[in-house]
Image: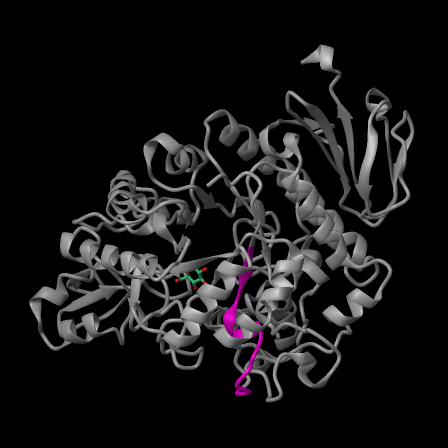
Amino acid sequence: MSLKNKVIYQIYPKSFKDTDNNGIGDIQGIIQKIPYLQSLGIDMIWVNPFYPSPQKDNGYDISDYMKIDPIFGDFNDFDELISKLDKAGIGLMMDMVFNHTSTEHEWFQKALKGKKKYQDYYIIRENKAVGPPTNWSSKFGGGAWAPFDHNRSYLHLYDVSQADLNWRNPEVREELYNIVRFWLNKGVKGLRFDVLNVIGKDEILVDADDNEAHEKALYTDTPIVHDYIKELHEKTFGRYPDIVTVGEMSSTSVENAVLYTQAERKELDMIFSFHHLKVDYKDGNKWANKPFDFLTLKKLLWSWQKEMINGHGFMALFWNNHDQPRSNSRFGDPEHYPYETATMLATVLHALKGTPYIFQGEEFGMKNPNFGHIDDYDDIETKNAYRELRKKFSDEEAMSIIQKKSRDNSRTPMAWNNSLHYGFSTATPWLRMPENGITLENDLAHPKSIFRYYQNLIHWRKNSDAVQNGDLVPVYENHPSLMIYERNSDKESLLIIGNFYDKSAEVNLNDYADFQKVFGNGPLSLLSKNTVLSPYETAVFIKSKEVSDV
Ligand code: GLC
């Protein structure tokens, strides 16, 4: 399947649409909204995990990979979803969380009961004379080891309830491949592999020095990960036609990203990388407030685009997902320029090379809820971070960081309309919903509708030769407020412009005076020596190549 003109929509099922009115979204809710998804123009939905799970990490702690958690529905609902999506021309991408299982998974439970076979499914090591096997940290705070029995510990790179699997054991890999085939046989068309580049741990695990990057390097992008992915490809999705695959790659390098996605290597179609979303970290620390660094953001986007295009790799393009704060709150001003911010960010992203992902609610401008109390947040990473922050800061200071950084920023339920609980559910939602007037109903009633802009953007992208096949040339790379780039294919050239700030900006675009405007979100109509962009304005201009040029 050609991915170049596809757009994928991410659904966080707990927060999408509740039909059995228990405050938690469900599969029937997704089914109900298929016409909505269809009208947006997307090709595939990626649904976050809906397997049985103790929900310590919102479904990323799986206790049974081949069942559906009853809070979301059952296999009848699932089959109905697949068949109705199919009729609507939409594929289903499932989340495969294979770095770890929940400690409530039967494999871990059998391991605890002493079954050697299952102990070898996990990464269990003897403690040192004093302390755990290594000094590694968990990505959710604290140490990465928890006691397994009196003298051994198990590794958990994430929550203590998420035990890392031992991919070195061929039996583990076979179990996981079996799970993939099970879902593919049920009609799943896409696979999103959670934190896939940390599956390749060594047999002998060693202490890290004080440098966080050195520590991550001990288990990230190790060469054996490529071997595992090749095997996964060969034994599972490589045997089925047109399966779309994406790997979530924690702190990966562009060199590895190219290797993971070059078609002839038969690994994955594309990867998610996160470097561009770390430009508001303070010295690498997520849990500190800092305005985003625009020049670094551009540098990262350009260098990744160029190297992926040159190396024949392929990218997933995204500003938002269930682990990120809302991008319009982060990179724009949704209070004063909600429409301009949302449409500018969408335009400059969708015109890049890759497959864009839209995270639910983004298409009508949902923003960070700014809840004032820690009890309004649910996420385990957020709660752990709050506890740590409170050791150093007042509640107010800690909350100002939580409000900007929490993963729950994106997880608040969909605000469909202006009725009770915003049409998400008739019961109290599992996570508080903000009262900020941003609903799909309000957006559609507005002459400047973000949703309608997305519809047009997606439609345009599907038919744009330069977006799909063109090279990328950054323009005025060091401009402090504008992102400008060309995309050039044999047939046409595009100029894409976005103003990332709330001040007008002037720029000399005389070289593009013969380009014509395709669309945008503001008044700009011609390019000239004194082109002025309004706050958060964006536009796409085109020049078709003469026949004689070709
Ligand atoms: C990925 C998921 C995230 C989860 C983590 C551990 O990063 O996107 O939500 O907490 O993996 O599974």
Q: Would residue 528 appear left or right of 149 to someone viewing this image?
A: right
Asked whether residue 320 is drawn in magenta, I would say no
Q: Position of residue 216 (x, y in %)?
A: 36, 48
Q: Residue at x 33, y 36 (%)?
A: 266
With respect to residue 188, does 263 lie above or below?
above
Along the line of sight, which residue is nearer the eye, 3 or 395?
3
Q: Would residue 229 appear left or right of 35 to someone viewing this image?
A: left
- Image quadrant assignment for residue 287: bottom right
With respect to residue 435, does 178 lie above or below?
above
* Screen quadrant of the C terminus: top right
Q: Residue at x 52, y 60 (%)?
A: 87
Q: Position of residue 293 (x, y in %)?
A: 66, 44
With respect to residue 499, does 322 lie above or below?
below
Q: Would residue 205 appear left or right of 70 to someone viewing this image?
A: left
Q: Would residue 415 appear left or right of 231 to someone viewing this image?
A: right
User: Residue 361: in sight, yes or no?
Assistant: yes
Q: Residue at x 57, y 66 (%)?
A: 406
With respect to residue 550, does 482 lie above or below?
below
Judging from the image, the colouring scheme is one colour
Q: Position of residue 380 (x, y in %)?
A: 46, 72
- Image quadrant assignment for residue 116: bottom left
User: What residue span does the magenta drawing correspond to?
Assistant: 9-22
Q: Residue at x 24, y 47 (%)?
A: 235
Which quarter of the rendered image does ligand 1 occupy?
bottom left
Q: Position of residue 501 (x, y in %)?
A: 79, 47
